Image (cartoon, coloured by chain):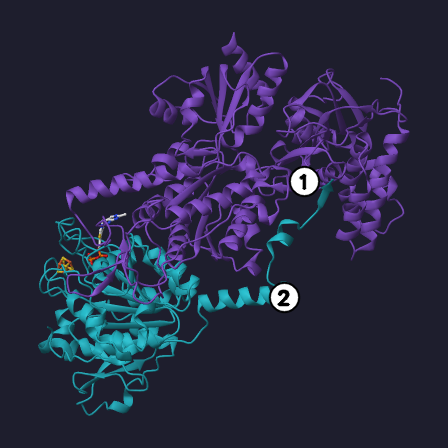
């Protein structure tokens, strides 16, 4: 090991740090504070928490390990990082679970106090990794973290438990020092958080400082780094998680449209986080309804839309399965509805805390009868804001349910998000019928004036929307086939065909509003990588890496999965090979083959984990030969 | 038209006709649904509500067609889920007068979950449950209210399911208004609909409805002239429980009800239990009359309690939070938490 050179830290473009420990070790907090410090250092960043599925797993076990990974840099950051540069492992189990993520030659800082026989036992380790040579490929920093924390707080009145709880601040202080991050934000946060508990506040501040001093004084730490500010677009930024962004996007949609948001939901991981977030914002007139099940959740949302509000519900795959029949009703009654699916590993309960893109075919085809609907897939945590906003716009403009396909990777992950100016949001106007007009009225069989609820707007083919409570526009809607214009029940053969075709044509029209499809990297040539939704970061990074090595590969990320963009075919025609990476067993590729009648190359990963850029690089190189 | 029918109408300047849509009513001739429809169309003008504020939401079944025949706002939703749609609608726009129309299969089989939760939450709606003790629309299978041993197409050897008693289910779900009436007594039905409408909260009204095609006469012992007085007891708040033209009554024997002969020397009307619609225990006692054949079936408002509706509580909370935090501004919301600026 080389001597410490604290005077001249090495400047590096980017780094990935992973904090891992017991669920009770405060790793999520530690990670968030490191994130904030990196944000204040003006780095670009992306984060991914990794919680255990168990609620309170026994301490010291591998299934109780909680992790927080952060990738930050002076360069554009697309993913939470393929390989970890620094792992801080608070116990043996955390080391065991996350060691494989560390790059060869990377640094592992371990709390040596958590490697007693009992700890090894709990982690199911046969030998001590600190002595058995299994860490030979890494630079290991051994720190008696618990002892040092206890020593630092020897004079306080705090209980042993309280003392031990602050050891995460030691880890934070050390990590901040190693990457030359500002310490002030963490100090401010501690002062605020423990304002009412001065003893705990002072202990945490003290331990945090001890952590940074430890870095300065101990020779064991070979390197110190700086990561310069990234060249980011000017503006005000915040770190935002996908679930949060979805909730804010919905609030924004309500705010800009003037519609009250009605959010019906039944708890399910990982969609519940949206409910938790949006239910805080009642001062925006948002109504949240925790229903008795997913069927009631979507039903209440459709009822809210019938009333003239913006009906929204969010769930995950099993919940979407339950909502299927009602979504069909929304297709038939042509009412706006936003259905958010935070996809997770399936089928059935599957891998409830792990991301997967397994529900695309369900979104496209999972209803009885001919029931097409638009499908939107946000491509990053921050994009969730715009996707939710857009889903609401499409739903109301085209009078249709819209499916938004996110996943736990987007929902839990966060990125540095440039806060949009309200004026830059797309305009959101809603057309309500406010009274009888020549176009929307006729004389019924009894010679009375009757409203025609299925008269359509010419530009969108959307039917007119009249709120109950509007005089003279009384009308009935329902699941039975509708007669064109009157909306009366009709079993007429030709009418049914016409209505099925009209509903499909209406959904096709949604594509008329898309911006031109962006092609990044090469705009023509040997290979195009065509992804959708949350795989964007990994694909972006992979394509950049490949192109840096001199190849000319293009990349398109579909955000509008259905209907497909009208200009996509022309783009596909410019490439010889089209590689379609998906976190499923091949779903978008079926839609593509079906639509364009040409060949596509699949790249499928179904492990409950996002793509690593290197996996996509390998696939690209394999195809390029 | 069933006996005892008397037409009225005219309240609020509207008449029965104003609530009739131009759609042909397609129930089987003789179906009890006709009487319910025409009673609703006669009641509405008397309620003083504006037509444009009235919404009927139904599930699936013969009863599910109901909204199409009403010239109001309406939604024919999906099987069993009408309470869910009604919940979102009513909470979104509390000014609406929301009626739920459902059947015994719709409300108690596939929709049982939604029904109990709408009742417990006290969603301010009128829930009209057309109970014909059979699946009508699917052509005659037994339903959750069919009696044990019922022989139908799906139970050629008799059903082995114990039936639900709808009012007992509603009471068990803590409904704030529980009533029972019958298609063949439009006057009573009308009075009960008015009472249900006047109640703020979820008003559960079971309506015995004859399906003359698949379960003809299922309730005739309660509805037909020759047996009605002996088998049906019409409860009134503050009145002693008597029936059979005042010759019989119900008294409390310990914690049980006992039928007593008021013409005997032993009992008089002062021995009869005086009904109190706000007494939950009494409602449970009467609501359980279903399995005992020796007691008359009670009709009328069995229970009524004033408690806040779900919609009121939701909107009070919205207002309270808004008052405390101030009306939200999107700019501040987006900039909340830790932010940093890059120039
Ligand atoms: C999801 C679903 N399952 C089954 C059906 C078929 N179905 C329609 S109505 C009905 C039963 C209706 O019985 P009830 O509620 O008693 O109403 P009635 O027809 O007697 O008025 C059934 C099973 C359906 N429409 N939807
Ligand atoms: S089947 Fe029975 S309930 Fe249905 S319309 Fe005919 S008579 Fe009425």
Q: Secondary structure at mark 1?
A: helix
Chain bearing mark 1: A
- What hue represents chain A? purple
> Is there one chain holding both mark 2 and mark 1?
no
Closer to the camera, B122 or B273? B122
Is residue A292 shown above or below B260?
Answer: above
Crowd band around label 2 with a 10 angstrom C-alpha radius: few (<14), some (14–19), many (20+): few
User: Mark number for residue A223?
Assistant: none
Q: According to the image, label 2 marks what residue?
A: B324
Asked if marks 2 and 1 touch (Cβ < 8 Å), the reply is no
User: Quadrant for ligand 2?
Assistant: bottom left
Q: Is residue A236 visible?
A: yes
Check residue A28 in the rendering and tell me which mark sits there, or answer none.
1
Q: Is residue B329 above or below residue A54?
A: below
Q: Which chain's colour is cyan?
A: B
Please state, as top left, top right, bottom left or bottom right, where the N terminus of chain A lies in the image.
Answer: top right
Q: Secondary structure at mark 2?
A: helix
Query: In this view of the protein, can residue A126 be seen by the observer?
Result: no
Residue B243 location, quadrant: bottom left
């Amino acid at each position: 090991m080389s001597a410490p050179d604290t005077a001249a830290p090495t400047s590096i473009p980017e780094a990935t740090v992973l904090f891992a420990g017991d669920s009770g070790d405060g790793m999520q907090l530690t990670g968030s504070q490191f994130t904030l410090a990196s944000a204040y250092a003006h780095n670009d960043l992306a984060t991914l928490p990794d919680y255990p599925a168990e609620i309170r797993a026994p301490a010291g076990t591998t299934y109780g390990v909680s992790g927080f990974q952060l990738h930050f840099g002076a360069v554009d950051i697309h993913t939470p990082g393929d390989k970890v540069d620094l792992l801080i492992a608070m116990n043996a189990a955390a080391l065991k679970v996350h060691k494989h993520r560390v790059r060869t030659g990377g640094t592992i800082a371990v709390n040596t106090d958590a490697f007693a026989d009992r700890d090894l036992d709990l982690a199911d380790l046969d030998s001590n990794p600190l002595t058995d040579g299994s860490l030979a490929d890494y630079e290991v920093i051994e720190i008696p973290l618990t002892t040092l924390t206890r020593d630092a707080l020897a004079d306080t009145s705090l209980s042993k438990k309280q003392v031990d709880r602050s050891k995460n601040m030691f880890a934070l202080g050390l990590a901040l020092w190693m990457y030359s991050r500002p310490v002030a934000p963490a100090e401010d946060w501690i002062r605020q958080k423990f304002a009412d508990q001065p003893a705990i506040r002072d202990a945490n501040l003290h331990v945090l400082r001890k952590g940074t001093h430890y870095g300065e004084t101990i020779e064991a730490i070979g390197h110190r780094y700086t990561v310069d500010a990234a060249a980011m677009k000017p503006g005000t930024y915040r770190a935002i998680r996908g679930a949060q962004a979805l909730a804010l996007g919905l609030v924004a949609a309500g705010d800009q449209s003037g519609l009250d948001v009605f959010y019906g939901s039944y708890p399910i991981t990982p969609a519940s986080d949206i409910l938790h977030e949006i239910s805080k914002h009642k001062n925006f007139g948002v109504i949240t309804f925790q229903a008795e099940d997913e069927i009631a959740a979507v039903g209440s949302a459709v009822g809210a839309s019938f009333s003239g509000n913006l009906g929204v519900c969010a769930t995950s795959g099993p919940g979407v399965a339950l909502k299927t029949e009602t979504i069909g009703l929304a297709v038939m009654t042509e009412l706006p509805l936003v259905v958010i699916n935070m996809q997770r590993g399936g089928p059935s309960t599957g891998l409830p805390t792990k991301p997967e893109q397994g529900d695309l075919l369900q979104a496209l085809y999972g209803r009885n009868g001919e029931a097409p609907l638009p499908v939107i897939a946000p491509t990053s945590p921050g994009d969730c804001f715009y996707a939710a906003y857009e889903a609401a716009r499409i739903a109301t403009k085209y009078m249709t349910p819209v499916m938004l396909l996110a996943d736990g990777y987007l929902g839990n992950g966060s990125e540095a998000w440039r806060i949009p100016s309200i004026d830059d949001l797309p305009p959101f106007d809603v057309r309500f019928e406010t009274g009888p007009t020549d176009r929307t009225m006729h004389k019924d069989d009894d010679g009375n004036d009757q409203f025609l609820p299925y008269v359509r707007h010419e530009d969108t083919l959307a039917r007119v929307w009249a709120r109950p409570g509007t005089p003279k526009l009384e009308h009935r809607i329902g699941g039975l086939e509708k007669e064109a214009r009157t909306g009366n029940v009709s079993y007429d053969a030709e009418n049914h065909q016409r209505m099925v075709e009209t509903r499909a044509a209406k959904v096709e029209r949604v594509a008329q509003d898309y911006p031109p499809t962006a092609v990044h990297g090469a705009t023509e040539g040997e290979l195009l990588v065509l992804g959708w939704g949350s795989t964007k970061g990994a694909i972006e990074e992979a394509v950049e890496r490949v192109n840096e090595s001199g190849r000319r590969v293009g990349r398109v990320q579909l955000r509008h999965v259905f209907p497909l963009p009208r200009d996509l075919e022309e783009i596909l025609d410019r490439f010889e090979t089209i590689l379609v990476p998906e976190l499923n067993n091949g779903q978008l590729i079926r839609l593509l083959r079906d639509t364009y009648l040409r060949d596509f190359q699949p790249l499928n990963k179904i492990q409950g984990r996002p793509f690593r850029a290197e996996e996509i690089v390998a696939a690209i190189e394999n195809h390029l030969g | 038209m069933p006996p005892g029918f008397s037409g009225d109408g005219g309240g609020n300047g509207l008449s029965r006709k104003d609530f009739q849509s131009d759609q042909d009513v397609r129930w089987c001739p003789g179906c009890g649904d006709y009487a319910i429809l025409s009673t609703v169309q006669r009641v509405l003008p008397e309620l003083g509500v504006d037509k444009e504020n009235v919404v009927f939401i139904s599930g699936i079944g013969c009863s599910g067609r109901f909204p199409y025949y009403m010239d109001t706002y309406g939604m024919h939703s999906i099987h069993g889920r009408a309470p869910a749609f009604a919940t979102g609608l009513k909470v979104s726009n509390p000014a609406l007068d929301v009626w739920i129309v459902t059947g015994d299969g719709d409300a108690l089989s596939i929709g049982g979950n939604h029904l109990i939760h709408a009742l417990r939450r006290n969603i301010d709606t009128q829930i009209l449950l057309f109970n014909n003790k059979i699946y009508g629309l699917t052509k005659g299978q037994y339903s959750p209210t069919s009696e044990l041993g019922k022989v139908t197409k799906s139970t050629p050897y008799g059903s082995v399911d114990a039936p639900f008693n709808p009012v007992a289910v509603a009471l068990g779900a803590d409904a704030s208004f529980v009533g029972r009436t019958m298609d063949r007594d439009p006057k009573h039905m009308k009075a009960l609909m008015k009472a249900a409408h006047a109640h703020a909260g979820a008003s559960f009204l079971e309506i015995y409805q004859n399906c003359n095609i698949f379960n003809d006469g299922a309730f005739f012992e309660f509805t037909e002239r020759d047996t009605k007085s002996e088998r049906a007891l019409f409860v009134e708040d503050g009145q002693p429980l008597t029936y059979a033209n005042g010759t019989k009554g119900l008294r409390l024997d310990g914690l049980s009800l006992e039928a007593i002969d008021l013409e005997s020397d032993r009992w008089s009307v002062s021995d009869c239990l005086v009904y109190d619609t706000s007494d939950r225990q009494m409602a449970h006692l009467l609501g359980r009359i279903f399995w005992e054949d020796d007691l008359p079936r009670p009709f009328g408002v069995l229970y009524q309690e004033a408690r806040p509706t779900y919609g009121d509580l939701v909107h009070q909370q919205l207002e309270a939070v808004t008052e405390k935090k101030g009306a939200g501004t999107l700019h501040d919301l987006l900039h909340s938490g830790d932010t940093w600026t890059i120039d």
